[in-house]
Amino acid sequence: MANKMVYYFGKSKTEGKGKPKALLGGKGLNLAEMTSIGLPVPPGFTITTEVCDQYYKAGKQLPSGLMDEVGKAIKKLEKELDKKFGDDSNPLLVSVRSGAAVSMPGMMNTILNLGLNDISTEGLAKATKNERFAYDAYRRLINMFGDVVMGMDHHQFEIAFDKIKKKYNVSDDTEVPAEGLKELCEAYKEVYKEHTGEMFPQDPVAQLELSIEAVFGSWNTDRAVKYREIEGIRHLLGTAVNVQSMVYGNMGDDSGTGVAFTRNPNTGGNKFYGEFLINAQGEDVVAGIRTPQPVAEMPKWNRAIHKELLEVKKTLENHYAEMQDIEFTIERGTLYMLQTRTGKRTGIAAVKIACDLVKEELIDQKEAVMRVDPNALTQLLLPSFKTTARNAAEVLCKGINASPGAAVGKPAFTAEEARERKDAGEDIILVRRETSPEDVDGMSAAVGILTSTGGATSHAAVVARGWGKCCVAGASDVEIDEKKKRLKVHGQTLGVNDVISLDGTTGEVMLGAVETQEPKLSGDFAKLMKWADEYRTLAVRTNADSPADSKRARDFGAEGIGLCRTEHMFFEPDRIIHMRSMILAEEEKDRRQALAKLLPFQRKDFEGIFKAMAGLPVTIRLLDPPLHEFLPHETAAQKEMAAELGVKASDIKKRIEALHEANPMLGHRGCRLSITYPEVLEMQVQAITEAAINCGKKKIKAHPEIMIPLVGTYKELALLRGKVEETIAKTVAAKKFEGDLDISIGTMIEIPRACLTADEIAEHADFFSFGTNDLTQMAFGYSRDDIGGFLPDYLEQEILDVDPFQSLDQTGVGQLVELGVTKGRSAKKALKIGICGEHGGDPSSVEFCHRVGLNYVSCSPFRVPIARLAAAQAAITNS
């Protein structure tokens, strides 16, 4: 391996400054940076991520020449510190830590006090004149080395320690005298030998080599792999290894260690925030072995160190122009900096810190827009669980985090039950195997939705996000018994009187009522959104089906409606009866009679939406789902419907059987319904036109865009466009309206063939809107409702990087979108094109939409701010 493998940092030489983070990892690069700006950093060296990559490619073998470079770096350390590795009078000890290019707190391995053996421990006791400290350090190394390097059970060491504490009649680790710690080291070595079959290694170089391998090995532990999967961390070479000379926070009451943030990571407040322990090592803080004190109380212990830390805070923020997460140690009254990295923070804190850094002139507005993760804004918009309450809750199981937020309620197992119990004053969680449009009333009534199947773009998820409701989907560990009104999870049975809590942000289902908190939107949020709007070129619309959703979306900055799903309007109790009458009718005249009763409801809905959007465009999708979805499938519900309609239950059953399709997603739906039953299209277009006319008479500007779904050939669109135009003309004539109507007609591009023939289709369209949910289904051949059965395996084995229904597959489905844009505009240069699938609220997908030249994206109301910020970042990145 020809490349340099080891980079030294110290007073004599700092080799890593300015090198790529991908090579040295975040920790290694920052150690070099801190050293170069004069902060008190114990010297050391970094082994690159390329070596980790080589280690795995060679079948978990360290590359030749590595330990030679490591040996040279150790010599530099010995010279700089005037100490010797393994010395019997003044030994050099080091820590060995991980450090990937992207921070993965606590996911990988650390070994402290490396270099101690029987001889050097005596040397450390002499050099420090502190025998107790030396043997405390040695017992920690044996424990940590056994645990991290050799894979021993930490509990075995605890048993030995308990015996020593019992012998000396003490309860706290710090109360064990030096003699007891000497005995403990011997006991630990026996435990080590018993469980590994080997003596504890006395050669410091051998210890170091094994520890380097252990850190590389921790890159692929289950917890590290899972963390990268959850965080979407991909395409890294591996972890770097940072070997750094030890400083000791456990040398007495003038020593200590701590972890802190230069600003409050929860609120963003510009106040030093963190914890420290007196007479302890760093692992004691992060492992929770002892209860630390807040750094605000540090002046009571050592005012000078607290003042020095505040100066370090200022230096780091001026250098990085960013809030930092730091680790520090105080050895006998001297401060040392062990680490700095960009601090993880809540969405609320991210917005405040970005705005404050602009105010402090550390960054400009453009950089502030780039600093905030768009997805983090979710935390500002939806309820969440209080951290302390959530941490104390019992987690029953985990599903797919389909719609963020927090919900607490009692299970209801049908839509009807949910509505009845909600009306009786209960907070309800609708629990279903899967949801369909038929469940919409129950979904509306529920505070949260839990399904045992389905994914992040299943019906439940899509509707929940649109309404700002918490949803956990695909919780396959949940067994639902609708008849007995109970659910089982891992042996626990819960009924209608039990309370559960859903965390739609993590996908966790918890037992009992976990305390929630409502979001508070600050002035900083509005400020950041204003800056974002100045940079973005992509318009942001919303998916909304009601005046309430429309108003909410406008409040969040939506510039129109990109998808109004008309089917959701038919499920209200006073409407569904007429819809079902229409479906059951065998003659056209009977269908028209039923549709005439639905017309006033549709018209009123559209008037409310037009009024709420106040002249902004409203894209209305004509009826899309197959008709069977509007009919009940359970015998009891069919009998109830028969009684309401005055027909035989057997007739309803026959009609349902006649409408049954083997694959309804590819069946009689979308534009195909309008071709078979043009009277449905006519009623909807008449309602839209009349609503626009009525609004016009009230001086309310309406801008409807009629969207014909599921077109696969230009002939479908040409035929149906003609029917739409004819209906508009008839309605205008019947109303004797002489004003201008601003109604455009377009189509939803959601079939691969439509992308391939977009130039032909564009001849008959005023606009395109890509329905990427269905386009993804048809391109992959995946059902979005059933993908939960195999998606975890695909993600774990990296067959897929992400769920393609959550983030657009840019290399495959994206090609279809790009082709549709190119071909469509080749036929009609000014063709307006947007996206209305759930991808419209995903930052990565928004960036893609910007790059391929779309005019707008559309997403659920609660994701509008996310899309606005993502669009701004896309414009800045691609400028």
Image: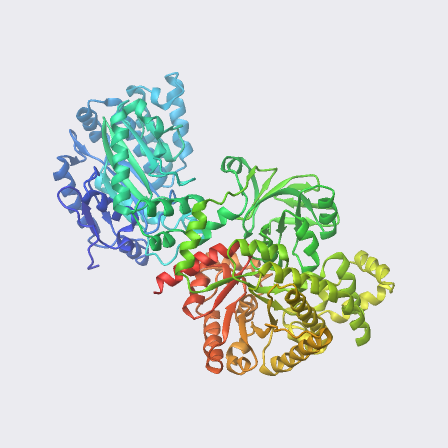
| Picture residue at 43% right of the left edge, 46% below the top | 524
- In terms of image quadrants, where is residue 580? bottom right
Q: Quadrant of residue 280?
A: top left
Question: What is the count of numbered marks?
Answer: 0
Relative to 174, 541 lies left or right: right
Inspect this view and state whether residue 481 appears: yes
Q: Is residue 856 above or below residue 868?
A: below
Residue in front for this viewpoint, 783 or 750: 750
Is 567 placed left or right of 334 in the picture? right
Q: Is residue 85 above or below residue 372?
A: above
Q: Residue furthest top?
A: 169
Q: In which image quadrant can residue 184 be found?
A: top left
> Split into 4 quadrants, where in the image is the N terminus?
bottom left
Q: Reply above or below: 143 against 45.
A: above
Q: Is residue 108 left or right of residue 658?
A: left
Return the residue nearer the eye: 165 or 842. 842
Q: Nearer the viewer, residue 724 or 171?
A: 724
Q: How is the image coloured?
A: rainbow
Residue at 28% x, 53% y: name it.
Answer: 21
The quarter of the rendered structure image containing the C terminus is bottom left
Residue 317 rendering spot, x and y as whole percentages: 28, 43
**For this rendering, which residue is in front, 31 or 723?**
723
Point out residue 794 in the picture as x, y percentages from the top left corner: 49, 60
Q: Say if residue 104 shows up in the picture.
A: no
Residue 807 rendering spot, x and y as whole percentages: 48, 61
Where residue 790 appears, x then y in whole percent?
Answer: 54, 59
